[in-house]
Amino acid sequence: MIPRETVDEIIETARVDEVVGEFVNLKKRGANLLGLCPFHNEKTPSFTVSPAKGIYKCFGCGKAGGAVNFLMDHEQYSYPEALKYLANKYNIEIEEDEQSPEEIQAANQKESLFIVNQFAKETFIKIMNEDEEGRAIGLSYFKERGFRTDIIEKFGLGYCKEDWSHFTDLALEKGYSLDYLQQAGLTIVKEAEEGKPKRHFDRFRARVMFPIHNISGRVIAFGGRTLKADKKTAKYVNSPESEIYNKSRVLYGLHLAKRKIVETENCYLVEGYTDVISLHQQGIENVVASSGTSLTVDQIKLIKRYSPKVTILYDGDEAGIKASFRGIDLILEEGLSVKVLAFPEGEDPDSFARNHSAEEVKSYLESEAVDFIAFKTRILVGETKNDPIKRAGMIREIVQSIALIPDPITRSVYVQESSNLLEIEEETLMLELNKIRRQKLTKNIQRREDEQRAEQSFEHLAVEKKLEKAEQKEYQEKDLIETLIKFGNQEFTYRPDEKEEGESHKVSEYLIDEIIHDQIEFKDPLYRKVFQLFVEAKEAGKELREQELISNEDKEISVMAIEALLEKYELSLNWEEKHKILTISQEEELPRKIHKGICSWRLSRVIDMIHEKQDELKENPDNYEDIIGVISLLEEAKKKLAAELGRIVLPK
């Protein structure tokens, strides 16, 4: 368990703009930062980060929070995991006991898989550097490829011994669970045959190892390459998918590339592990790999978080390039700008980077990358020659790609460019493009109508649920708790009579004293929890800071704090400057708001008590006089409170 003092230090130190900026490409907009939301698919940025408030908020999907919340939502971290990530980022030491094998097994499943994979990475590195077989085969292979020691260490490259179960046996000796080793894909278990025990062996035996990381740099899987010439043996073996690894949502090297991608506003996309590593060695760090899989929409969205531009690097194989056109179309459909570069025949990004100097590689990438339209035209023109039917098909294929681009201005620019390249009238291309887009729109409308019909039967349930939720809201309680969250640490002057000078109070202390004095408990369990946090802070003689509430382990408390604090600054001084409208700040309104909040809450409670006594009278008419006496007192209190609030209370 992390000590409370350390938690406070982590929350106090972490900057939401720095944390979010590792995962999202943010642009300065006034006092805030703006980017595409990482939690839902959007084309227009609605994701705002406020460094001053320590909060992020998406006005599209509603996601909001602080640095800790972002890591929990985006990276699926537990609360302690998010704190540890931030502690590591800001060099804050956490004094925790080392986990025993028993504690590792008791940890949640995802964390256990992360732990097992990290152990595997460290073991493969150790084998490659300290074991005779590892040095002779694994290390020598990487050295022969020209990888420097610092690059080998940077990517965590390693080696798994040829023994059938060397790694698995070692992991079991250290106390790691066979079940988790199997789930992580490190170990293959052969079920017991009749009369024989169950057997296990290493999935990656006799292979050099490439650890695969998530965006945060945690090991989620491995790729293993055999060094044998046996044609029956697969050249590469990858980890199977698991709870922490979905290959269609991962880009190799992104954890190392994301900062450079943001800086350069461009992402180089290659196919293999060694392509990424060789380019890194030559100083090209804004590069990721699809790891041999066909490019997926999820992978494209990962790139889009950091850059609006992609440059795809191909080897000289035209057949392979043609097969990848589908990937280019997916990128265009997501609204990214695409350039393409093909290396000379017989070269790929790995070999080219190894055979040329860093300056030559950089110069080649910058000068040879061409727009996808010019590239696609060049490839397809070679096939059509003088065949008019094939030429018409090629033109239609290019127009279909342009039709996928969401932005109309960009589409028009590409139509103009294609008109020049293909020597065909711009109007003809535009007519074909509009025809394709109309067909697609019709299909989308039909699909949406089908979905709406399927959902209609459930709509009334959603409406009922909303009404029920609205009825359950205790508005007075909510108002008081939000006042505590927004202004709890501020001072205000309470004047029972406007002619009097008044006394100065801290908002939280005043409200706590008044609420406890009235001996009234919050009905809503969430409000009760928040109120208790303020009470505990008061008793401990400290302030409950905004960031502590935003980053609270309890998701409900965190969300409520975020929503309340986002409202705090909604009235802008720009209204006074632009429209000459005088606005009263919430701070100026604070004394009246607090007094009104307490009175409203008391009035609500008094009305409830009157109803309770009226019900009691029906059940116990013998106690008529006593109950009527109490009701009369409550009615007097009700009139007094209503008068203070400026209300007219009509008899019922």
Image: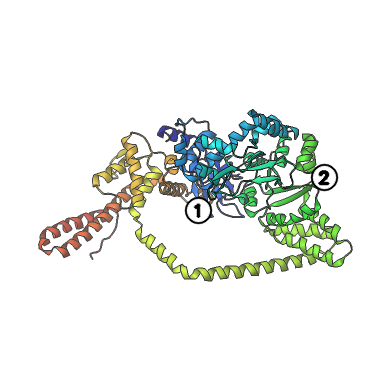
Please tell me whether residue 144 is drawn above or below residue 183 in the rendered image: above
Residue 536 falls left or right of residue 196? left
**Of residues 128 and 49, which is closer to you in this image?**
128
Residue that label 1 marks: 62
Crowding at label 2, few (<14), some or many (≥20) Cα neighbours within 10 Å? Answer: few
**The image quarter in which residue 421 lies:** bottom right
User: Residue 203's spot in the image, x, y percent?
Assistant: 61, 43
**The image quarter in which residue 364 lies:** top right
Task: Identify the residue at image location x=70%, y=33%.
Answer: 137
**Of residues 85 and 531, which is closer to you in this image?**
85
Please tell me whether residue 346 is drawn above or below residue 471 in the rendered image: above
**Of residues 522 and 98, which is closer to you in this image?**
98
User: Residue 5's spot in the image, x, y percent?
Assistant: 41, 32
Disc 2 residue type? Gly
Residue that label 2 marks: 346
User: Residue 240's spot in the image, x, y percent?
Assistant: 60, 48
Residue 578 falls left or right of residue 330? left
Secondary element under disc 2, as helix, strand or loop, is loop
Q: Give the mark, 2 or 1, whose residue is nearer the N terminus.
A: 1
Quadrant where the N terminus lies?
top left
Q: Is residue 414 visible?
A: yes
Secondary element under disc 1, as helix, strand or loop, is loop
Q: Could you tell me if the residues under marks 2 and 1 are in contact, i.e. CB atoms within 8 Å?
A: no
* Colour approach in the figure: rainbow
Q: Is residue 186 visible?
A: no
